[in-house]
Image (cartoon, rainbow, N blue to C red):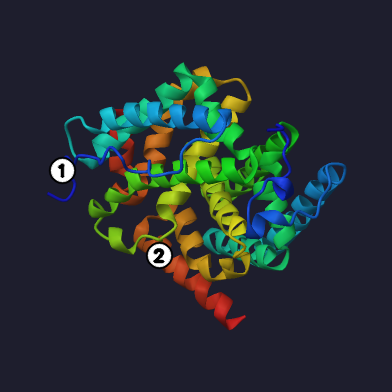
Amino acid sequence: MPRHTSISTAGGGGALDDNPYSSDDFPAAFSGAVARLQVSVLEACRRHEAWPEKVAAALGAAVDFAAREADGVRLLTVDSLIRRPDGGRRYVRTVEHFSELLRAESPPDNRRPRSTEQALVGGVATTFADHARTGTLAELPAALPELVEFVLLPYVGAAEARRWGRWAGRQRDSA
Amino acid sequence: MPCGPRRLDARQGTDIEQPTDDFATAFEGAFARLQVRVEEAMAGEGEWPVRIAAAIRAGLDFAAADPAAANLLSNEALSRGAAGIARYQRLIGYLAGLIAPGRECAAGGARLPEITERALAGGVAMLVAKRLDQGRAAELPSLAPEAIEFVLTPYVGNAEARRIAAA
């Protein structure tokens, strides 16, 4: 089997069969998708002051992006890993980038080992990839409270993280 | 006893189709070897947090000792299209299944987000895959304390997770 099998030709079903990017397009398409996601996240964060609100807003922007740009999210979380080594390294750099954003914003007295943010963002990316593979990215916004709770839990504890998750859900419902 | 010793079903996560090519055969062999190491570690004494910590250490030791197998289970599987991804998903599901009994240890365990175990497993797998891709497999055992703390925190809280990770 070719090492760089495109997901669109891999023989899978459903959501895996429909890759709109050729090999030549991949670097530019990946960079463009990262940039659009980053702009969405940063703009959402800027509208909030409190750190947990920023995290919730960032995740809200990310799930909205996923629902709006399914091809882009599939490129970032699924196709990139097929296009090794370049795609895999781009994927890791993207995870590290958002990990650094999360770490930079976290309160110094709540700092965790550096790998925590990478694993949290990797875990969120796993959830996005699960939805991308099953063609259910449009359902991701409904998972926002869970994602917020998952990411905040190591910093603020279970009860507080759950409260922020519910807050994020209410913000979404009222928007 | 909610968090007491519990035997794993040795067949957990292994009910899959027969290998059909070299990659599939190699993946299944590597997966089986990982399962043996992890489940032997989990079969030790102690409650779930201590045993899952031992399993994480065993998994990272396995990856450091056999980076080719670990790479096959992670980076290589993800690069193989639908068939590889399905196998990788099964690996993540298996690891998530090992973590899930932690809910019985947490006061509000039943209320943890549904995504928790897969996201924890996916997060740790990403940390491992990254080091393998960068040729830094030898560093993996030293990642154990941080990985253990990360996995245990939702179930036992920060302080207890840190204590077990440092033990």
User: Could you tell me which secondary element the residue under label 2 belongs to?
Assistant: helix
Q: Tell me the kind of residue under disc 1.
A: Gly
Q: Can residue A114 be seen in this view?
A: no
Spatial CA span between label 1 and label 2: 27 Å
Q: Tell me the kind of residue under disc 2.
A: Arg
Q: Name the residue under label 2.
A: A162
Task: Answer few, some or many: residues within 10 Å of disc 1's Cα (few below 14, many 20 plus, some between 14 and 19).
Answer: some
Image position, residue A106 (x, y; %): 54, 49
Image position, residue A71 (x, y; %): 73, 59
In the depicted structure, whether residue A112 falls above or below residue B145: below
Image position, residue A1 (x, y; %): 68, 33
Q: Mark 1 points at which residue?
A: B4
User: Could you tell me which secondary element the residue under label 1 belongs to?
Assistant: loop
Q: Residue furthest bottom?
A: A174
Question: In terms of depth relative to the viewer, which is nearer, B145 or B3?
Answer: B3
Give the residue displayed 50% in from the left and 29% down from the top. B25
Q: Are marks 1 and 2 in contact (CB under 8 Å)?
A: no
Quarter-of-image position of residue A83: top right
Task: Answer few, some or many: residues within 10 Å of disc 2's Cα (few below 14, many 20 plus, some between 14 and 19).
Answer: many
The answer to whether B12 appears left or right of A19 in the picture is left
In the depicted structure, whether residue B79 falls above or below residue A66: above
Tell me the mark number nearer the camera, choosing from 1 and 2.
1
Question: In terms of depth relative to the viewer, which is nearer, B103 or B11?
Answer: B11
The answer to whether B89 appears left or right of A82 in the picture is left
Marked residue chain, label 2: A
Give the residue displayed 55% in from the left and 55% down from the top. A130
Q: Which residue lies furthest to the left in this view?
A: B1
In the depicted structure, whether residue B59 falls above or below residue B150: above
**Quarter of the figure with the C terminus of chain B:** top left
